């Protein structure tokens, strides 16, 4: 037991010691310690070096907001991780840790020369330096800058750990298990609602774990906490996830959670996942994230031993650790006095309480006097001393007129500061919820919500324990009620709670030159108050611009302890109220999250999974050759014994044109678009019109990017007035869905539309050929297949082979065709039945190569093959697919640009080689004059080229400059050893009148 550990105090298990190392030295701690509490118990405050100035840094906090105490952890071969926050890293037997950002050692860091030259490294110095001589950039400046960049060392070996992922649904998700969160979860749970309660710490309790002065319902805070835990554990409808951080709050109440499963175990079970990423879709969300204590801004506030007063209280009451034997408290908020009182009652000699406020509550003064603690009210701190740990503090009186008097030096080994508390509004901000400025408290509070959520407790600006419990209970009841459950709020009686008040500050008053003071705002990125004021002087007025110029709030902690102080200083510098200056954007993840957690199972062989359709196994058993298409394995062709690919494809093509072929089209992307505004959404996303498309009809859809170039296409069916079945290209499914979601969430959030990927929901069997209708007529129920009832480009729902189907009357071959959509689990069974029944028509399975030939004969394009990202609808001969009367759609304005209207753009045409037996090579370049000097001017290239059995010759498609006007001209295609000639023709080679579609 060290002199900084208080026996029998705290919540750690002092009967179970653990040993760990820090920078090679062995230390002792207890089960339940964090690395931070264990090191502090051993008297270790120096934990690392700052990023820019390499100043010595110690622990600032006791939670996930920690900006300083980032360490490297080594849990065995391949299990090294940099930038782990020591304040949340649980100590266990055998843990090995190292400090970061120094050389050659933590105590003696050559990089500290930057601290002596700090005036050269002011805000934005990198924008103003390294300009001359120009030749130095590549050889001198850039290598040095890149070498200095970053925190910690990246792992060099593969990560052997596994990471899990899970989806979950619940009625009520409660984030945070402090008083408000527990009250919310208890009342929501009692209603019968399915509740998930998550907290990033190893045990439930939040602030109750650190504050021991108030009682709840006649019990101590800890006794009530144990009772609440037991009650939650007894509810089968409640899931409690500790060591679980809510990292992001997304659209439609989707919340991402990262659960740490084995990092706290000395010997994790073999193959147990290290972390699990949860994707929770909640009907209602209660955010009870608590608040974060604000540091004070003064010269030397970053020295090891200077920390937040509330954190010192946590280390004392939760871990039984004194952060010093002679601390000084500097504060502008009553809560720091409670830390001083707890320390004094634990036997610690508190040297002084320095309060910036000239007057303080009399009961605080009386209690301090009773404990023998000196109080200096109306004083300020102007500096600290101590090389590797604070040794003294300079305190100065401040007159009512603001004049700073002479300094007094107070010897100390810890300086505990508090500037009040800031509600944690990060997750609420992720949802684009409105933040309201509270002038009295100088803080942002949650305002109007955009999701089905509510905030409670300190995270909502309610800092009283009694009020937090009441608000949490009310939030839990409201959430359960909105989820459809009858709930009743419990009542709570709180005894012994003090009403706490405080004052807000920018920089503390000082007698020093503020233009040279090292008064830190952002501890991790070494941003000082003078840096922020310099940014304002140099023209940056918005907090977002100030953030980027100074890098305040851009560290791994996202400015949790710095943002409000930085905003206050910027507000004063620009002489505008804080709301007018703005608040920086909080983005997921809430805390740094491992790549492994995001990757989950998708690594190694599962990183890029070969996707297979439900019919893939049948194709393999029947001798198909396969090709990769995007992430899918697709049947390429079905050779018979002794057949070449050319012969097999010719046979398959002939069968489709003469009788009947079947094709597995399950890989087509499929998206269900549903909602009262579905037609309007489609109208905006696609070039053609959708509002007048009748239910039961299909339409070819063409999608452009904002640049006006073709991105994707597909046949789309309107099933009802508010439901569309959208198909995309095989490789474009994810891209199209992402693009749709992007527009829906950022450009048109007012539209009531829901998008669901159904690619793997449906197996799709394409039947093509003159006998297609004859085959399915006896197998279909509830659908009239007559030409009048189900003409080309129609869709109907019914059954086939007794299985529900969405039957598309559509063709990608030019023949009479159907695309039979059935639930994926029935895909192979329906395929096999169709194949069996089709034997009377010599039904022939065909693969992607035959599909390519058949569609090329009809001039149907394949996006990505016949387009290259620079092709417009008009270039591709698809001008007819543009809704001329539509006021707007994605890409419309770009189509009006002068360059897009030029007649010499590359345009899609057909090619017939002079030698009908010559099949051109796809990708081959095209020239007009084969005798021109090198380098020749290339005017286009061949996009598709095949042998057509139906035509008895080769065919090709190409994009050529001014191609439409060149029809009938001869072009040249240079290839190794020979130049081929071809005639420019239209793109439709077979059945131009489309008579066979209705044969």
Image: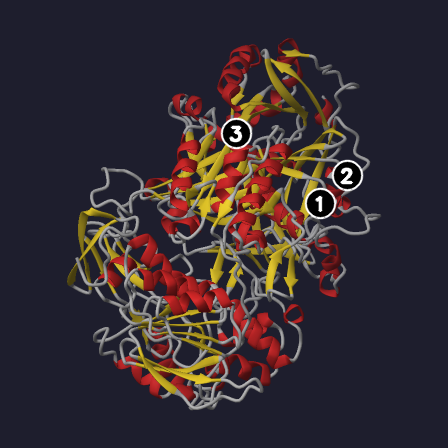
With 325 as the anchor, is 896 left or right in this view? Answer: right
Q: Which quadrant holds residue 4?
A: bottom left
User: Could you say whether the residue bearing mark 1 is in a helix, strand or loop?
Assistant: loop
Residue at left 22%, top 54%? 7
List the residue tagged with mark 2.
690
Q: Which-is-in-front pick, marks 3 and 1? A: 3
Report the residue marked by disc 3: 190
The residue at 52%/45% (across/down) is: 180
| Among numbered discs 3 and 1, the one appearing first in the sequence | 3
Q: Quadrant of the N terminus?
A: bottom left
Horizontal and vertical percent position of residue 970: 65, 54
Q: Is residue 105 left or right of residue 507?
A: left
Residue 915 location, quadrant = top right
Tag shown at residue 686: 1
Asked if the residue at tag 2 contacts the one at tag 1, i.e. Cβ–Cβ closer than 8 Å, the answer is yes
Locate residue 587, reporting x and y percent. Answer: 53, 57
> Distance between the Cα atoms at labels 3 and 1?
49 Å
View extreme (right): residue = 885
């Amino acid at each position: 037991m060290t002199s900084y550990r208080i026996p029998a105090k705290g919540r750690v298990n002092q009967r179970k010691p653990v040993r760990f190392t820090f920078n090679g030295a062995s230390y002792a701690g207890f089960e339940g310690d964090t690395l931070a509490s264990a090191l502090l118990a051993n008297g270790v405050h120096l934990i690392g070096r700052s990023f820019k100035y390499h100043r010595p840094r110690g622990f600032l906090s006791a939670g996930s907001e920690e900006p300083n105490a980032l360490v490297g952890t080594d849990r065995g071969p391949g299990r090294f991780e940099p930038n782990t926050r020591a304040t949340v890293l649980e100590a266990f037997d055998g843990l090995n840790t190292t400090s970061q950002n120094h050389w050659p050692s933590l105590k003696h860091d050559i990089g500290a020369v930057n601290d002596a030259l700090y005036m050269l490294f002011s805000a934005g110095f990198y924008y103003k330096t390294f300009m001359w001589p120009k030749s130095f950039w590549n050889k001198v400046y850039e290598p040095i800058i890149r070498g200095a960049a970053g925190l910690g060392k990246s792992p060099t070996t593969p990560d052997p750990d596994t990471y899990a992922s899970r989806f979950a649904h619940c009625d009520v998700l409660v984030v945070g298990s402090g008083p408000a969160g527990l009250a919310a979860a208890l009342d929501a749970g009692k209603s019968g609602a399915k509740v998930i309660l998550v907290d990033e710490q190893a045990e439930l309790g939040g602030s109750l774990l650190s504050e021991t002065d108030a009682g709840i319902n006649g019990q101590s805070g800890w006794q009530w906490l144990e009772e609440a835990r037991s009650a939650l554990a007894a509810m089968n409808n409640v899931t409690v996830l500790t060591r679980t951080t809510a990292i992001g709050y997304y659209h439609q109440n989707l919340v991402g959670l990262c659960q740490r499963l084995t990092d706290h175990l000395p010997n994790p079970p073999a193959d147990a996942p290290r972390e699990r990423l949860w994707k929770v879709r909640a009907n209602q969300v209660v955010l009870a994230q608590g608040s974060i204590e604000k540091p004070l801004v003064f010269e030397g506030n970053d020295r090891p031993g200077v920390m937040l007063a509330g954190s010192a209280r946590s280390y004392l009451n939760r871990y039984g650790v004194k952060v010093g034997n002679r601390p000084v408290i500097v504060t502008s908020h009553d809560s720091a006095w409670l830390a001083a009182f707890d320390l004094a009652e634990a036997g610690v000699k508190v040297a002084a309480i320095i309060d910036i406020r000239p007057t303080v509550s009399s009961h605080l003064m009386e209690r301090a006097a009773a404990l023998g603690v000196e109080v200096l009210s109306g004083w300020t701190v102007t500096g600290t001393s101590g090389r590797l740990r604070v040794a003294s503090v300079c305190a100065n009186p401040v007159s009512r007129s603001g004049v700073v008097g002479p300094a007094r030096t107070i010897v100390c080994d810890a300086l505990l500061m508090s500037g009040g508390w800031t509600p944690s509004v990060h997750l609420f901000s992720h949802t684009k919820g409105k933040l309201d400025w509270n002038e009295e408290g100088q803080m942002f509070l949650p305002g109007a919500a955009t999701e089905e959520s509510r905030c409670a407790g300190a995270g909502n600006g309610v800092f009283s324990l009694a009020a937090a419990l009441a608000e949490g209970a009310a939030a839990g009841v409201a959430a359960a009620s909105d989820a459809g459950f009858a709930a009743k709020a419990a009542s709570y009686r709180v005894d012994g709670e003090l009403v706490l008040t405080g004052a807000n500050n920018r920089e503390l008053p000082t007698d020093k030159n503020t233009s040279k003071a090292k008064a830190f705002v952002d501890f991790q990125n070494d941003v000082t108050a003078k840096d922020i004021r310099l940014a304002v002087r140099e023209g940056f007025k918005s907090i977002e611009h100030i953030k980027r110029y100074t890098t305040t709030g851009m560290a791994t902690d996202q400015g949790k302890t710095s943002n409000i102080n930085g905003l206050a200083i910027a507000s004063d510098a620009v002489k505008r109220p804080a709301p007018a200056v703005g608040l920086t954007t909080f983005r997921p993840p809430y805390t740094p999250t491992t790549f492994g957690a995001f990757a989950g199972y998708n690594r190694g062989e599962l990183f890029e999974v070969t996707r297979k359709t439900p019919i893939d196994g049948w194709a393999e058993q029947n001798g198909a050759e396969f090709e990769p298409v995007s992430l899918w394995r697709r049947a390429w062709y079905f050779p018979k014994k002794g057949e070449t690919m050319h012969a097999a494809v010719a046979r398959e093509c002939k069968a489709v044109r003469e009788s009947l072929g079947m094709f597995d089209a399950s890989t087509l992307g499929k998206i269900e678009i549903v909602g009262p505004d579905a037609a309007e959404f489609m109208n905006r996303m696609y070039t053609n019109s959708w509002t007048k498309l009748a239910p039961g009809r299909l339409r070819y859809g063409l999608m452009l990017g904002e640049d006006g170039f073709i991105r994707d296409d597909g046949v789309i069916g309107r099933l009802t007035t508010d439901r569309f079945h959208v198909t995309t290209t095989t490789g474009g499914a994810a891209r199209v869905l992402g693009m749709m979601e992007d527009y829906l969430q950022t450009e048109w959030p007012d539209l009531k539309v829901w998008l669901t990927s159904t690619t793997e929901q449906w197996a799709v069997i394409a039947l093509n050929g003159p006998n297609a209708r004859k085959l399915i007529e006896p197998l279909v129920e509830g659908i009239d297949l007559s030409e009048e009832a189900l003409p080309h480009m129609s869709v109907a729902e019914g059954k086939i082979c007794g299985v529900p189907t969405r039957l598309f009357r559509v063709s990608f071959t030019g023949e009479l065709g159907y695309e039979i959509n059935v639930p994926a689990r029935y895909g192979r069974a329906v395929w096999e039945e169709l194949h069996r029944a089709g034997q009377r028509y010599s039904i022939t399975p065909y693969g992607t190569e035959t599909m390519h030939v058949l569609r090329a004969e009809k001039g149907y394009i394949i996006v990505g093959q016949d387009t290259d990202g620079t092709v417009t609808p008009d270039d591709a001969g698809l001008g007819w697919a543009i809704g001329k009367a539509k006021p707007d759609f994605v890409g419309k304005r770009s189509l009006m640009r002068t360059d897009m209207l030029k007649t010499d753009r590359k345009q899609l045409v057909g090619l017939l080689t002079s030698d009908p037996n010559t099949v051109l090579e796809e990708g081959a370049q095209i020239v007009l004059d084969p005798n021109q000097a090198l380098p020749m001017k290339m005017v286009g290239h061949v996009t598709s080229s095949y042998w057509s059995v139906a035509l008895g010759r080769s065919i090709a498609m190409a994009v050529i400059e001014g191609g439409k006007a060149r029809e009938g001209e001869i072009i040249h295609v240079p290839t190794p050893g020979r130049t081929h000639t071809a005639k420019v023709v239209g793109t439709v080679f077979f059945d131009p009148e489309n008579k066979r579609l209705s044969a």
